[in-house]
């Protein structure tokens, strides 16, 4: 059972890492896109 219990933890860790990256990257890209669309004057 120990092997079965570690596999979901690894999958959850990968999911948590992916979510953390998305949470950081998406707002940054949104801000860059928003700023790039503003007039420069």
Image: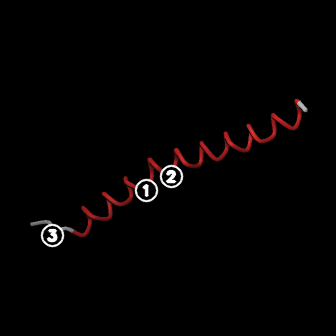
Residue situated furthest front in the rendering:
1
Can you say which quadrant of the picture contains the N terminus? top right
User: Quadrant of residue 8 in the image?
Assistant: top right
Of marks 3 and 2, the one in the foreground: 2
Q: Residue at x 27, y 64 (%)?
A: 34
Task: Indicate left or right for 16 with 3 as reference.
Answer: left
User: Quadrant of residue 40 in the image?
Assistant: bottom left
Q: Position of residue 20 (x, y in %)?
A: 52, 44
User: Quadrant of residue 7 in the image?
Assistant: top right
Q: Position of residue 4 (x, y in %)?
A: 87, 38
Label count reads 3
* Mark found first going from the N terminus, 3 or 2: 2
Q: Is residue 22 above or below residue 1?
A: below
Q: Do callouts 2 and 1 mark residues in contact (Cβ within 8 Å)?
A: yes
Q: Do callouts 3 and 1 mark residues in contact (Cβ within 8 Å)?
A: no
- The disc placed on residue 22 is 2
Helix, strand or loop status at disc 3: loop
Q: Residue at x 60, y 43 (%)?
A: 16
Q: Position of residue 22 (x, y in %)?
A: 50, 52
Q: Residues within 10 Å of mark 3 (few under 14, many from 20)?
A: few
Residue situated furthest left in the rendering:
41
Helix, strand or loop status at disc 2: helix
Q: Is residue 4 above or below residue 38?
A: above
- Viewer-proximal residue among 29 and 14: 14
- Viewer-proximal residue among 35 and 17: 17
Q: Circle 1 sits on which residue?
A: 26
Q: Is residue 18 above or below residue 35?
A: above
| Distance from Cα at disc 3 to Cα at disc 2 | 28 Å
Task: Indicate left or right for 30 with 3 as reference.
Answer: left
Q: Residue at x 73, y 44 (%)?
A: 11
Q: Residues within 10 Å of mark 2 (few under 14, many from 20)?
A: few
Q: Circle 3 sits on which residue?
A: 39
């Amino acid at each position: 059972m120990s092997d079965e219990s570690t596999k979901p933890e690894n999958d959850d860790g990968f999911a948590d890492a992916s979510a953390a990256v998305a949470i950081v990257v998406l707002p940054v890209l949104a801000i860059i896109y928003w700023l790039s669309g503003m007039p420069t004057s």
